Image (tube, grey):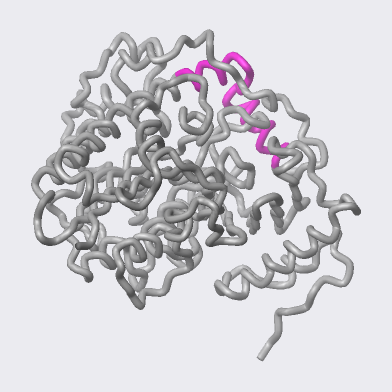
Amino acid sequence: MRPNFVIIMCDQQLREHLGCYGSPYGVTPNLDRLAAEGLAFDNAYTASPVCTPARGAIFTGRTPHMSGAYINELPLYETVNTMGEIFARHGYRTGYVGKWHLDGAGYMGSGRAARGFPDSLWYDGQRYLDSLSPEERELGYGGCSNETLRERDLPDDLCWATRSSNRAVDFIGRHAGKDDPFLLVVSYDEPHPPGICPARFLDAVREADVAVPDSLCDALEGKPATHRKWQAADVSQYGVNAESMREGIYRYLACNAYVDSEIGRVLDAVDTNCRNETIVIYTTDHGDFMGQFGFTGKGAAMYEAITGVPLLVRAPGRTRPGSRTKALASTMDFIPTMLGLAGLSDDTPLDGTSLVAALDDPAATPREEVFIEFNRYGITQSVTGGFWPIRCIRTARWKLAINCFDTDELYDLETDPGELRNRINDPACAAIRDELHDRLLQHLDRVQDPLRGDCWAARPWRTNPPIHFTIA
């Protein structure tokens, strides 16, 4: 019998702020429970550290530039199959609740169901807003300070996460135990700003106990000029300093605690109705700097804070409870892995790799590397969102980022996990740097990257760069 799938995801969540990934704050007991009952990937990565391209990779299994949604506010190509379409073809009953951000209609969406998912359950941001009165809309999604949020004490049912969970729990109850399997996606907007949550979650931690990153005031010596420009912009425009970051992280942790409680409701529904028949997969689209290097949010960089993502998989009878793996994983790998777990073959073009081997044996290494790309932030952004194309390769130890118009970066993540020392010009690293460079160039050709060209090969540090771009 084919398994059910429940895909749960958050938006803009820093991996290290989950208890199962080392957070000292203890605000994610339900995700920690999921990790204790399944397998945690320590080295999972987004395909792009921006919402729309990251989500496009998850829900199509294609690289961002091949899905069509390669920057914010661009829609998927009509010729690309969604996860819903692929599994519906194989007899799965599908459902999607929560943030989509893949139809080109802005952050909250168009209110129209995506291909492969029925209209009856669809509840994107626009439908959420449409379900609120003008007064409720301002109260529940208008943005406010921590003090105002405490004073408002929003009722749970006014929040998007709670309303999404209600629909997810109902779907599981109605579809569990049927002859045909189901695929349900529960996509929370939280803890993405504005970080709306009921006031009681502000008591999840004390603001005074929140630590700011050690690298908050890093001078970015030897780093790309765009990084220094970004840091200066965040300081001047948003007043980024230790005090403001502590307040922001505190608000983020409160919202993180809230969304974790909602995830717990969905997990409880699975456990009550169909635990042994259901594979649960958890991730986020990308991370959040939370003050690291003086940055906020995400954007034109390849640091671990925004490219690394949590990935938890509970496959009853398959994953060993409480296991961990160092295997590399990409968010493009979801569809190939799910097809493998369901024993299905499909001729849809996919750029991801099946991770089934790592689920069966955490010591296995289905991938030798992951590739990450950045094109620009979005159509409307121009500061950190200007045209700063980046292509990146990450192996078990090394990360090479080619910043097309700027200084490139090479980090030894074994000796420098904080990515403080750029070793792109270090002669001691030349051999591994050039090997990674060759592999990255080969990848650009293999996936037909539309921006591939000599600009990626002819780098100032590369002696006799390979010439592999030919004109037929």
Give the answer, above or below, for where 244 lies relative to 285. above
Q: How many marks?
A: 0
Q: Residue at x 20, y 28 (%)?
A: 134
Give the answer, above or below, for where 358 lies relative to 151. below
Q: Residue at x 23, y 37 (%)?
A: 266
Percent position of residue 440, x then y:
67, 65
Q: Residue at x 49, y 44 (%)?
A: 286
Percent position of residue 391, x then y:
64, 58
Percent position of residue 269, x then y:
18, 37
- Identify the main secondary structure in magenta: helix
Locate residue 252 relative to residue 169 in the image: left or right: right
Q: Of residues 455 and 468, which is closer to you in this image?
A: 468
Of all residues shown, which one is farthest toward the bottom? 472
Q: Please state, as top left, top right, bottom left or bottom right, where the N terminus lies in the image.
A: bottom left
Image-quadrant location for residue 261:
top left
Q: Of residues 406 and 47, which is closer to you in this image?
A: 47
Magenta segment includes 237:
yes
Which residues make up the magenta segment?
227-250
Residue 111 seen from this side: no
Image-quadrant location for residue 82:
bottom left
Q: Residue at x 61, y 20 (%)?
A: 212
Locate residue 240 relative to residue 91 in the image: left or right: right
Percent position of residue 132, x then y:
18, 32
Image-quadrant location for residue 36:
top left
Locate residue 334 relative to residue 309 in the image: left or right: left
Q: Please state, as top left, top right, bottom left or bottom right, where the C terminus lies in the image.
A: bottom right
Residue 149 seen from this side: yes
Q: Of residues 107 and 250, which is closer to you in this image?
A: 250
Give the answer, above or below, for where 389 lies relative to 34. below
Magenta segment includes 348:
no
